[in-house]
Image: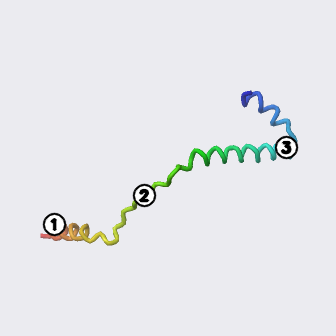
Amino acid sequence: MSLTNLLPSVQALPYEEKLRLLELLTADIRSEASAIASPLEPTPHSVWSPYSAYSVADVLLNLLAENSN
C-alpha cells in the first residue's frame, strides 16, 4: 500500500489514534535508525591539539626570526 492510498485513511483517524500512530512510527523509525547508525565496534579518532607542540613552535619562531631580518 502506498502513502497516497494511506493518507486519506490517516487523516480520517480521530486525534487519539493519530497520536498512537505517531508513537508507533516514531518507535519503528528509531529502532531502524539505531540499527543503521550504530557501528559494530566504535572507532577511536585522534584530535590534534596545539598544546605540547613544541617543535611546531620552534619552526614558527625560526620563520619569524628569518622574516624579521
Secondary element under disc 1, as helix, strand or loop, is helix
> Disc 3 or disc 2, which is closer to the eye?
2
Identify which residue is drawn at 72% across, 28% down: 2
Give the residue type that dot 3 points to. Answer: Glu
Residue where numbered disc 2 is placed:
45
Precedes in sequence: disc 2 or disc 1 = 2
The answer to whether 55 appears left or right of 66 in the picture is right
Residue at (19, 69) in percent of width and height: 64
Q: From mark 3 to mark 1, how far is it between C-alphas?
A: 74 Å
Q: Which mark is residue 67?
A: 1
Check the image and tell me how it is coloured: rainbow
Which badge, 3 or 2, is on the more N-terminal residue?
Answer: 3
The percent coordinates of residue 36 (x first, y second) are 58, 44
Label 3: state its secondary structure.
Answer: helix
Residue 17's disc number: 3
Instruction: State how many labels appear.
Output: 3
> Which x, y percent locates residue 13?
85, 38
Is residue 20 toward the left or the right of residue 50 in the image? right
Tag 1: amino acid: Asn
Label 2, label 1: how many angstroms apart (C-alpha)?
Answer: 36 Å
Please state which amino acid type lies under the numbered disc 2: His
Tell which tag, 3 or 1, sits nearer the viewer.
Answer: 3
User: Looking at the image, is mark 3 or mark 1 earlier in the sequence?
Assistant: 3
- State the image quarter where residue 46 is shown: bottom left
